[in-house]
Image (cartoon, rainbow, N blue to C red):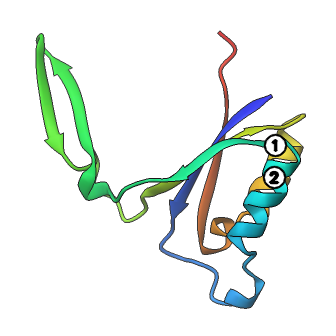
Amino acid sequence: MKYMMFVCTDTEPETDESRVPDIDVWVAENDAAGRRLDGNVLAPPTAATTVRVRGGEVLLTDGPFTETKEVIVGYDILECADLDEAIAVAAAHPMAHGGRVELRPYADL
């Protein structure tokens, strides 16, 4: 089952950084196991362009559509047996400690 894992900042990060896993180890382990299909860091929200169409007109906004303190800073695409495995993979990601990680299964269309 495929999952999109959004890696986000958080206003309440873990304060004990000694418990935060190493991102290079996380990537290497999940790449080697075939669970991480793709992933990358994203440019900051200031580089975003929001696109909307209203009344047939294309409307562009510089930056993210919403003002928020938490931002998506990266993503990973996971291939896991089930949600329990995806949760275990996400919980081992450093940003689960310093930020937040959102899992979404791919829709079965």
Mark 2 neighbour density, 10 Å: few (under 14) some (14–19) many (20 or more)? some
- In this picture, is 108 found above or below 79? above
User: Where, by quadrant of the figure, is residue 69 drawn?
Assistant: bottom left
Q: In the image, residue 30 lies at what x, y percent?
A: 81, 52
| Residue 46 drawn above or below residue 94 | above
- Residue 83 appears in view: yes
Name the amino acid type tagged 2: Asn
**At which x and y percent is residue 36?**
74, 44
Task: Name which of mark 1 and mark 2 comes first in the sequence.
Answer: 2
Left or right, residue 86 beside residue 66: right
| Mark 1 nearby-residue class (10 Å; few <14, some 14–19, many ≥20) | many
Q: Quadrant of the C terminus?
A: top right
Q: Position of residue 57 (x, y in %)?
A: 9, 16
Residue matched to label 1 = 35
Query: Which mark, residue 89?
Result: none
Amino acid of disc 1: Arg
In the shown orientation, is residue 9 left or right of residue 107? left
Q: Which residue was labeled with disc 2?
A: 30
What residue appears at the point 83 percent right and 39 percent down from the top-left corner?
Answer: 83
Q: Secondary structure at mark 2?
A: helix
User: What residue sits 90% from the left and 34% below the top?
Assistant: 81
Callout 1–callout 2 Cβ contact below 8 Å? yes
Which residue is at a point 81% across and 43% down the rendered structure image?
35
- Quarter of the picture containing the N terminus is top right
**Along the horizontal axis of the image, is 44 left or right of 73?**
left
Foreground pick, 31 / 52: 31
Residue 27 appears at what percent x and percent y? 73, 58
Q: CA distance from mark 1 to mark 2?
A: 5 Å
